[in-house]
């Protein structure tokens, strides 16, 4: 209990310091200091625990009560991110509690350090207990490895966002988010950006401004029933531009379709007839105003899949949102494109990331998964015999 | 499409309601056959499984995109997982809590009918999408039964937290698995296994709540009413993470909230 009380003392002290100096922000340094600062104390704590497993300080540092206290402290320091758009528009009073930037705050660092030390010490003690508690040893070891990998990796991480334009010359120099110029292991250029879209859906706007989307992907001869309106497509232009308030066939990447529809009420009476076209680079919106202040629109087609065809040192690759390109410890992710142009976009934005600590995180997650699966297979609750 | 889904959901709710009545009668008159309960619970599950299978085929995507779709899974998983856990633990005490959870969440879909469409955003096109969400929903289902049961026992002054705790020991590993799968997927899709998005932070807070709970289990078992209150409270954190987060100011900067249509 004494350890928990002392921990709370340190935490409150850190909180006061942070509240007095709200701009105080902690960042882990780059390699090798990130590893020394994270793995060093943890390794030391684990060895100490192994060596003097029954020492009162070791018992306290590796106790379940410190686990609870440290975990709840992590929750108490990071909750503003869960509730407010921190960094964009968070309430000013968070400053008074030293929580304007929770993740770089002193109390958060203390809470995370306590979690790591507690895990390390309990593991050091646990290693003496033999295989009957193996699943908890594996699980806690996995957690500790993942937390250490995450913390150290955060210090050593290199991230660079960049935009490539179709046809531009290959390049390998990018600016990292911290302003450093870094070289990628390969020279990249964008050959083609491809965006496939779904067919559009209908949208009914009620007089009070609420919107209701149909269920059917609109195409030639499609029918849909939205908010009691029976809508039938009588003419369909898969790719159209709007000229003098009329849709005309026009084929260019980025053009939207247009649909001529007849709208009936549930009794079959005709309520309207005309063209619909979503707003886009090739013409303004065409919609139909209906009785009672309602209106019918053709929603903008939603993206289905997008991919960047790139060349890395002359070799062609495709990058999609769930398939980054991996080269030499770097991963290059496709982030976005020029959404105002849609399929006509000739640019795509990417993020290149080098995280040398990633294997540690994955090994940790693997052990954690193994441990929880073993626990799931043979759950044990307090009071049961191990 | 949504009309067919509505009627199938209504059918399942009806089956489970009658099964619930049969379960209550079985408690009042022990020793009587519980065939009616079993058949109707099974029929309700069959309707939900058929609905999900049909939606998967008709929508040409996993029906896990909208909040309404996840509620169908949650209701089905509550009853299926509840029955499995009850069978494994050899208890009949889970019958009512699991049916109530199933009925409650399907009824939400009956009151707020959902539009169903085929679109699926590119980020969700990953082999990890289905395992991540299903494992999470399964853990929510188990933890929901645990929370519901704890609340019931708390109100009825029946302070025995053993079964709720056992369910937490099944739900927490699943929650952890869901969290890990989410991190691996996020790394693959966006390059960051943990980005402190509001939804991710709620997922961490939920996990912390349950991890803290089981680490305090030994002491809490000696104060059963407090234990029941805390177990019920932990499920409120799950609900925050699952959908109440949509109503917080932080939702404006989240990339993870379910679409509400
Ligand atoms: C999925 C997450 C976790 C699960 C399922 C879990 C499970 C458990 C269980 C069941 C025990 C009792 C084991 C026994 O008596 O042999 C335990 C003990 C313990 N856990 Fe965890 N744990 C988790 C995460 C954590 C975390 C994040 C921490 C650190 C903050 C932690 C620190 C501890 C400590 C210090 C003990 C007491 C060690 C001892 O008495 O030997 N655990 N854990």
Image (cartoon, rainbow, N blue to C red):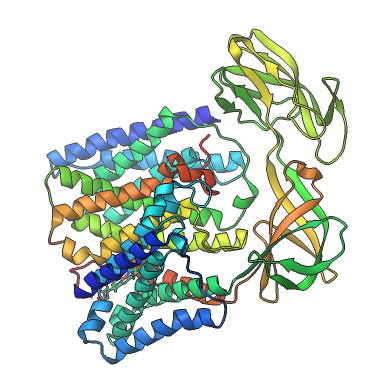
Front-most of B233 and A367?
B233
Q: Is residue B3 above or below residue A111?
A: above
Report the residue at 31% width, 49% height from top.
B235
Residue B120 placement, left or right of B92: right
Q: Is residue B117 above or below residue A56?
A: above
The reply to whether residue A62 is visible in this rendering is no
Residue B156: x %, y % from top left: 13, 43
Front-most of B50 and A377?
A377
Residue A71: x %, y % from top left: 33, 65
* Residue that protrudes farthest toward the front in the picture: A20
Q: Is residue B249 above or below residue A334?
A: above
Residue A62: x %, y % from top left: 28, 78
Residue A315 placement, left or right of B37: right
Report the residue at 36% width, 50% height from top.
B238
State which image quarter holds ligand 1: bottom left
Residue B168: x %, y % from top left: 29, 58
The reply to whether residue B111 is visible in this rendering is yes
Report the residue at 32% width, 52% height from top.
B143
Report the residue at 54% width, 39% height from top.
B55
Residue A130 placement, left or right of B116: left
In which quadrant of the rendered view does residue A199 lie? top right
């Amino acid at each position: 209990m004494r350890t928990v009380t002392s921990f709370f003392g340190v935490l409150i002290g850190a909180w006061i310091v942070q509240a007095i100096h709200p701009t105080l922000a902690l960042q882990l340094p780059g390699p090798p200091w990130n590893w020394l600062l994270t793995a060093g104390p943890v390794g030391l704590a684990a060895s100490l625990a192994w060596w003097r497993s029954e020492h009162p300080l070791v018992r306290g540092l590796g106790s379940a009560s410190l686990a609870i206290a440290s975990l709840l402290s992590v929750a108490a320091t990071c909750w503003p991110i869960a509730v407010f758009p921190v960094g964009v528009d968070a309430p000013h009073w968070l400053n008074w509690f030293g929580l304007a930037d929770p993740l770089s705050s002193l109390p958060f660092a203390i809470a995370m350090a306590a979690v790591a030390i507690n895990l390390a010490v309990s593991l050091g003690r646990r290693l003496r207990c033999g295989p009957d508690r193996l699943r908890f040893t594996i699980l806690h070891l996995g957690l500790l490895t993942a937390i250490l990998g995450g913390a150290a990796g955060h210090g050593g991480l290199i991230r660079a966002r960049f935009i490539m334009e179709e046809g531009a010359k290959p390049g390998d120099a990018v600016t990292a988010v911290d302003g450093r110029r870094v070289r990628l292991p390969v020279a990249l250029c964008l050959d083609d950006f491809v965006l496939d879209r779904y067919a559009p859906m209908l949208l009914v706007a009620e007089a009070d401004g609420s919107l209701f989307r149909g269920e059917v992907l609109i195409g030639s001869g499609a029918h849909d029933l939205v908010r009691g309106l029976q809508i039938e497509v009588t003419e369909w232009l898969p790719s159209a531009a709007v000229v003098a308030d009329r849709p005309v066939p026009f084929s260019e990447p980025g053009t939207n379709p247009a649909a001529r529809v007849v709208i009936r009420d549930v009794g079959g009476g005709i309520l309207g007839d005309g063209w619909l076209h979503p707003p886009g680079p090739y013409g303004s919106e065409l919609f139909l105003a209906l009785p009672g202040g309602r209106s019918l629109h053709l929603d903008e087609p939603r993206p289905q899949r997008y991919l960047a065809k790139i060349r890395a040192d002359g070799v062609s690759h495709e990058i999609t949102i769930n398939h980054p390109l991996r080269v030499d410890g770097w991963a290059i992710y496709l982030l976005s494109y020029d959404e105002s142009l849609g399929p006509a976009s000739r640019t795509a934005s990417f993020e290149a990331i080098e995280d040398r600590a990633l294997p540690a995180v994955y090994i940790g997650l693997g052990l954690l998964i193994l441990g929880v699966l073993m626990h799931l297979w043979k759950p044990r609750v307090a009071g049961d015999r191990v | 499409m949504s009309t067919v889904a509505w009627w199938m959901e209504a059918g399942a709710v009806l089956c489970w309601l009658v099964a619930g009545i049969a379960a209550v009668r079985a408690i009042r008159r022990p020793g009587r056959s519980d065939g009616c309960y079993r058949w109707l619970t099974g029929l309700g599950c069959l309707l939900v499984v058929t609905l999900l299978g049909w939606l998967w085929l008709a929508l040409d995507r996993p029906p896990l995109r909208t909040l309404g779709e996840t509620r169908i899974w949650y209701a089905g998983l509550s009853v299926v997982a509840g029955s499995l856990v009850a069978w494994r633990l050899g208890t009949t005490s889970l019958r009512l809590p699991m049916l109530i959870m199933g009925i409650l969440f399907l009824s939400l879909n009956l009151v707020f009918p959902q539009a169903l469409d085929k679109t699926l955003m590119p980020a969700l096109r990953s082999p990890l999408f289905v395992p991540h969400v299903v494992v999470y929903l399964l853990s929510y289902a188990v933890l929901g039964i645990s929370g519901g049961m704890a609340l019931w026992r708390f109100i009825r002054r029946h302070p025995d937290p053993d079964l709720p705790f056992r369910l937490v020991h099944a739900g927490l590993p699943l929650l952890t698995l869901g969290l890990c799968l989410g991190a691996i997927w996020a790394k693959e899709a966006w390059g960051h296994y943990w980005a402190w998005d509001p939804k991710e932070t709620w997922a961490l807070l939920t996990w912390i709540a349950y991890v803290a709970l089981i680490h305090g289990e030994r002491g809490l078992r000696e104060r059963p009413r407090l234990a029941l209150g805390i177990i019920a409270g932990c499920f409120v954190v799950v609900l925050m993470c699952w959908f109440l987060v949509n109503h917080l100011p932080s939702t404006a900067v989240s990339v993870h909230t379910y679409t509400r249509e």
